[in-house]
Each structure stands twice: as C-alpha cells, then as structure tokens.
Image (tube, helix red, strand yellow):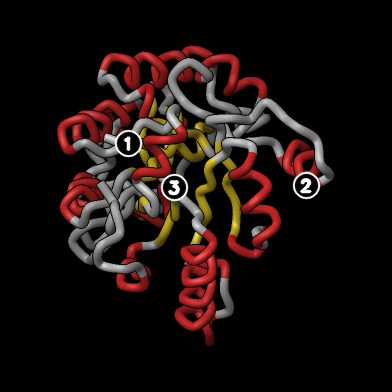
Amino acid sequence: MLNVRDIETVRAYRPFLVAHRGGVIAPDAPENSRPAIERAAVHGYAMVELDVMESRDGIPVLLHDGLYINCGVRARIADFTAADLTAIRYRASEEPILTLEQALDICAERGLGVMLDKLGNDAAPNGEMSEACLKRVADLLCKRNLSSATVSIIDSSWRRRHLADVALFPIPKGDVALALAGESLPVKDEFWFGWAAELDDRTIARLQALGTFLIVSINTFHYPKHAVDQLARADIERLLDAGVEGFQIDSVFESFFPPDAKRS
C-alpha cells in the first residue's frame, strides 16, 4: 500500500493512479459502489477517491452527485439515516449506497489508498460535515491502518483540525505562488493537487525540488466534448515526461498510461 507520508516511497510508485469517483465505473459498477472500488484494485490502481457525505444520524456515507441523479430520490442525503441510505439502490443497478466503513473495509483488504473528497453535509448551512462525523471518519481510517495511505483534496481549517493525523492535505495555492517566487517553504512530504492546466514544467520542477509530490486531476469534464481524448492524452504524455508522481483519472483514460506504470 502506498505510504503518502514518505516522499521516497511515493516517487518509487511513480506514476501511480487514483480512481476518480469511487473506482472503475461501468454499467454494473456505479460510482462509489462496491464493484467499482473492487475493480479499481483489480485494475491496479494505487488509490481510490471516495466522496463522503454525512447522514442524518452522523454516519459517513458515499455519494457524489446527490440522491436524485444517482438514485431517483428527491431528498437530501442528510434527510436519511445511514440504514435508510444503504437500503437505497442506484438507478439501473442493484448496488446499494455504501457507508464509508464498508468502503474502507474493501480498501484495507485490497491494499488501496484513499483520496477523500466532499466531506460534507447537504443540510448544513455551510455544507460542512459535523465534528462528530469527522471524528468518525478519522477513527475509521485509524482502525483500518489507512492513516499513512490517505489524502484529502477538500481542504479547510475545520477539516484539518480533525483529520490532519489521518489524512495528508494539499499545499495551499498561496504557498505554491510563494514557492514559484523563490521562497524556501517547509513543504517536504506534502502534495500538490489540481488540474493539468495549472501545471507547467517550471512549477513541477520547483515543487519537486522542495520535496513535494504532485497528483494531477485528469477528468473528462476538464475538456471540451469534441476533443476529450486528444487533449487528455496530450496532458498525460506531457506530465509523464515531466515526472509527475500521481494521476487522479476517470477510468476511460487508463489506456493512455504505459502498461508498466507502477499502480499498486
């Protein structure tokens, strides 16, 4: 399992892949579902991105675009208990919504690292997950020995306060600007996360020289529909040549990576 807190280990995995939207999605594997996560492990991904939301009873569950798009239910996630939610099936599927606990069991068993996204509550005025729920997330990661294999791409002082011991957070954009201006920052063993369009060779070289690793997001919605494959392939080839360590990708881009890429 990838240890994201050790820069040498991370670079030994280069390039490693992170499965976007909860795994390798297919007609029989909805996003954030059990088969999608399991398929990510089979395909050799190093990590899987999990979209975590809070249920009415404060339990972390997996869902990205809400109940209506995924399940045809016109309600908020926070209107239901975890037991209610895990009884709901994805549309055109028999797969149920998973709790984070169920998902982390799969990750621990299959040797998958974790990328946390969302960490929210769709009934809270500020959209933030409650303190109690964040503590549950931290406890679940700790008990499954995933603390050294977890990053969070959703950043805030609130989330850092409760998850810094179990998840690595990205370098703030302001610090990236300071690094490019020549500042020597204490960012060794930390990571940068963002779109390919934000990275040029100078930014990559400067951050890596400071002991930082990079995870670049390559998702279909980053590109115009008429040229998704063309532009994504060009970005991937450019960033592989530049030595970027990690790629968070939609699984449709798997074939754009060399077959000998270290993924797990």
Element under disc 2 = helix
Q: Amino acid under label 3?
A: His
Q: Residue at x 41, y 28 (%)?
A: 55
**Total marks in image:** 3
- Residue that mark 2 sits on: 180
Residue at position x 25%, y 62% in the image: 260
Marks 3 & 2, CB-CB < 8 Å contact: no
Q: Secondary structure at mark 1?
A: loop
Asked if residue 234 is positioned above or below residue 58 in the image, the reply reads: below
Q: Nearer the viewer, residue 199 or 101?
A: 199
Q: Earlier in the sequence, mark 2 or mark 1?
A: 1
Is 222 placed above or below 9 here? below
Badge 1, how many Cα within 10 Å: few under 14, some, many 20+? many
**Residue under numbered circle 3:** 64
Q: Position of residue 231 (x, y in %)?
A: 53, 78
Which residue has dot 1 on it?
A: 2
